[in-house]
Image: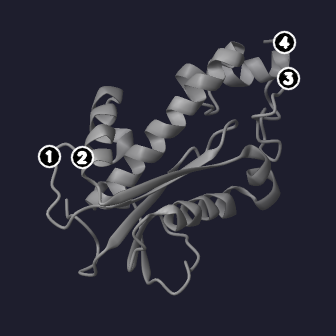
């Protein structure tokens, strides 16, 4: 994998986690890596074990020039829709970087201009560029950590395992217990065909 998309320094990679979830925030990270950064196991966070992700998070936090992680709440997701909330989350993470980027590499195919900083959207960029992969690791590990914490208050939804994604267990718990303040009310939480006798 290449370190970054452009020849411009500093370049920030950005990615989000939790877009398809029924509960919890959408979490975005932005990372600027040193030009000589390399790592043999760093790749798309979804391809890695939890142990590897946790190890990589420590390495990224230690070796990155700077990084930022931002949670955008379910209320905001409901207000602005998940696509806009994902982009807003990435913007907030970029804004929070201690070193302003001169180029942005974005995972996915949708983004909005961040000031006048040039950017490029890269589909599956977290498997192609180290700075986007690093952002995907931070976004996922920080969000997973938050959902595991929320699970202590709402254990019936099994968030420690499903992290708020639409699993059968999660949907069955919504049918049985209703929603929490952490559920996204604008999402279809229960499919129309799901029976209520679970």
Mark number for residue 178? 3
Earlier-in-chain disc, 4 versus 2: 2
The residue sitting at 57% across, 66% down in the picture is 91
User: Is the C-beta separation of discs 1 and 2 under 8 Å?
Assistant: yes
Q: Which dot, 4 or 3, sits closer to the camera?
A: 3
Write down the quadrant of residue 185 in the picture. top right
| Crowd rating for badge 1 (residues with CA inside 10 Å; few <14, some 14–19, many 20+) | few
The CA span between labels 4 and 2 is: 44 Å
Earlier-in-chain disc, 3 versus 1: 1
* Residue 76 sits above or below residue 163 on the image: below
Q: Secondary structure at mark 3?
A: loop
Mark number for residue 197? 4
Which residue sits furthest front? 98
Give the left or right position of residue 195, taking residue 170 as reference: right
Q: Secondary structure at mark 1?
A: loop
Q: Position of residue 120 (x, y in %)?
A: 41, 77
Looking at the picture, tell me which residue is in the foreground, 191 or 80.
80
Q: Secondary structure at mark 4?
A: loop
Q: Is residue 128 visible?
A: no
Mark number for residue 42? 2
Earlier-in-chain disc, 4 versus 1: 1
Q: Is residue 121 visible?
A: yes
Earlier-in-chain disc, 3 versus 2: 2
The CA span between labels 4 and 1 is: 49 Å
Q: Position of residue 53 (x, y in %)?
A: 33, 35
Q: Which dot, 4 or 1, sits closer to the camera?
A: 1
Mark number for residue 40? 1
Could you tell me which quadrant the C terminus lies in?
top right
The CA span between labels 3 and 1 is: 44 Å
């Amino acid at each position: 994998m290449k370190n970054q998309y452009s020849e411009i320094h500093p370049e920030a990679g950005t990615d989000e986690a939790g877009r398809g979830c029924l509960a919890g925030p959408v979490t975005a990270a932005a990372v600027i890596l040193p030009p000589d950064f390399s790592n043999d196991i760093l790749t798309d966070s979804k391809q890695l074990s939890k142990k590897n992700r946790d190890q990589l998070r420590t390495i990224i936090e230690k070796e990155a020039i700077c990084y930022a992680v931002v949670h955008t709440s379910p209320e905001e997701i409901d207000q602005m829709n998940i696509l806009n909330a994902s982009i807003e989350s990435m913007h907030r993470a970029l804004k929070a970087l201690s070193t302003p980027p001169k180029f942005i590499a974005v995972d996915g195919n949708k983004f909005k201009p961040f000031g006048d900083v040039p950017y490029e959207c890269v589909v599956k960029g977290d498997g192609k560029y180290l700075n986007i992969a690093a952002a995907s690791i931070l976004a996922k590990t920080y969000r997973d950590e938050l959902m595991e914490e929320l699970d202590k208050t709402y254990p019936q939804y099994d968030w420690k395992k499903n992290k708020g994604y639409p699993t059968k267990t999660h949907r069955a718990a919504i049918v049985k217990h209703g929603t929490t303040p952490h559920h996204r009310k604008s999402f279809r939480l229960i499919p129309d065909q799901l029976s209520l006798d679970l």
